[in-house]
């Protein structure tokens, strides 16, 4: 069972940084180049310089994005731009926003958690890739810090942890309160040993599921293994066995998963008519008059295996699977739960089996904004856009418990925890 503990966070010094909105950033893996440029320009101490520094043409082994991040981190500490807290704490973190006309107030906490080096306590649901893990490992070696929390989920049907978190946060003021992109982020430092002990006791009985941060979690394990017996200082070696995590209770009401849509570049020369004909054998194909109607209709079919499809001007469709049992016979190995994922059906059944279209990285683009998907088809950059309903939280849990991994981009938890609110120094 997971072992968690409080820690002394490194935070921005509010005496030097008057507006924290100028120095925080989204997680590194959703920062597009244009966002990186904007964050660089908005403030010289923005955390993007640590989590995703710019590469330069003259980079060398001695001077590169990783060494510059390490140099910036140490100099910001020396200059008191960043300061380390004096008392260990668990950090309560709320994100408040409006979605679909409803106000959502998600509460969680940030603490350290012992790494599951035996792969028994922490359940992932996504595959990891070599290149991102090598990138994050080089950064961790250089900076020796957890710069962003890994997003974890746990079950707490009795709300024992959340009751502690909400009880404390209602009576005290947060030390961070900032609104970015219509999401209000607030952070409190919980130092009460009795309350911390209660949270630790509840968490010690829980399975933990990774929501976001699979590559960083694998990197943390690789780094800890690398340091063991390497001759590194004992404090650094011991600290490497823990990582900084953001924990949220696994509840449908406060956990929002957004869909990620698919753009297909090469449709194997299939005409619109041929695509419709092939799909009609297995799907009820409903033609819609416009993009808005397509998305609205798709949203009403969340309980079904349904997809939106756009083939260009006048080609708005919703596809509803006729017989799941027939579809799963063409999907190879995997549990029934895995095969019932819309993303599994789309990739293995629709693309590969029915249409014979490659779903390799050079033929598929993933986008979150439906408008961007429609525009990409209209510009002629892609041939087909497929729109999905979001994966359910319960599906994430089931797949992780089976020890299976979801297809790429199956989940996009929203909102993301900000980078730069709290940092954990490992030396």
Image: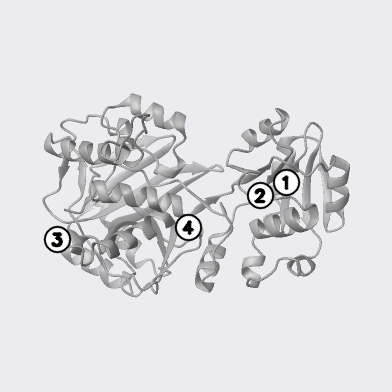
Residue 118 tag number = none
The residue carrying pointer 4 sits among few (fewer than 14), some (14 to 19) or many (20 or more) residues within 10 Å by Cα, namely: some
**Mark 1–mark 4 CB contact (< 8 Å):** no
Residue 339 vertical placement versus 85 (above, below): below
Residue indicated by mark 4: 128
**Camera-nearest label, 1 or 4:** 4
Residue indicated by mark 2: 388
Mark 2 or mark 4, earlier in chain: 4
Q: Residue furthest top?
A: 41
Seen at 67% across and 30% down, the residue is 375
Q: Is residue 26 left or right of residue 328?
A: left
Residue 186 image point, x, y percent: 31, 44
Mark 3 or mark 1, earlier in chain: 3
Q: Secondary structure at mark 2?
A: loop
Mark 1 or mark 4, earlier in chain: 4
Residue 235 tag number = 3
């Amino acid at each position: 069972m997971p072992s968690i503990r409080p820690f002394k966070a490194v935070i921005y010094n509010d005496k030097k940084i008057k507006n924290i909105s100028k120095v925080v950033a989204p997680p590194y893996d959703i920062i597009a180049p244009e966002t990186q440029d904007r964050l660089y320009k908005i403030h010289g101490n923005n955390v993007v310089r640590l989590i995703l520094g710019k590469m330069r043409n003259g980079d060398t082994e001695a001077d590169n994005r990783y060494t510059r991040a390490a140099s910036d981190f140490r100099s910001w500490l020396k200059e008191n731009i960043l300061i380390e807290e004096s008392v260990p704490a668990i950090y309560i973190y709320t994100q408040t926003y409006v979605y679909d006309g409803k106000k959502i107030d998600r509460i969680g906490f940030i603490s350290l958690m012992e790494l599951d080096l035996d792969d028994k306590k922490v359940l992932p649901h996504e595959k990891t890739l070599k290149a991102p893990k090598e990138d994050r490992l080089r950064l961790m070696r250089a900076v020796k810090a957890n710069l962003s929390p890994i997003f974890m989920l746990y079950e707490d049907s009795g709300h024992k942890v959340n009751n502690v978190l909400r009880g404390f946060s209602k009576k005290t003021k947060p030390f961070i309160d900032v609104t970015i992109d219509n999401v209000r982020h607030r952070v409190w430092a919980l130092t009460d040993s009795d309350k911390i002990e209660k949270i630790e006791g509840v968490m010690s009985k829980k399975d933990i599921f990774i929501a976001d941060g699979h590559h960083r979690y694998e990197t943390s394990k690789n780094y800890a293994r690398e340091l063991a017996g390497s001759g590194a200082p004992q404090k650094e070696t011991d600290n490497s066995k823990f990582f900084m995590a953001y924990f949220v209770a696994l509840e449908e009401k406060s956990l929002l998963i957004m869909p990620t849509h698919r753009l297909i570049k090469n449709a194997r020369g299939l005409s619109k008519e041929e695509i419709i004909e092939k799909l009609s054998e297995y799907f009820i194909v409903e033609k819609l008059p416009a993009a808005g109607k397509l998305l609205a209709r798709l949203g009403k079919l969340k309980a079904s295996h349904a997809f939106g499809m756009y083939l260009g001007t006048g080609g708005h469709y919703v596809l509803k699977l006729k017989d799941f049992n027939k579809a799963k016979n063409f999907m190879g190995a995997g549990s029934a739960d895995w095969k019932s994922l819309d993303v599994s059906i789309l990739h293995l059944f629709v693309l590969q089996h029915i249409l014979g279209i490659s779903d390799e990285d050079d033929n598929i683009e993933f986008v979150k904004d439906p408008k961007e998907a429609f525009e990409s088809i209209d510009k002629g950059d892609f041939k087909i856009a497929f729109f999905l309903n979001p994966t359910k939280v319960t599906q994430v849990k089931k797949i992780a418990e089976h020890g299976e991994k979801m297809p790429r981009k199956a989940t996009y938890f929203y909102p993301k925890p900000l980078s730069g609110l709290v940092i954990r120094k490992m030396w």
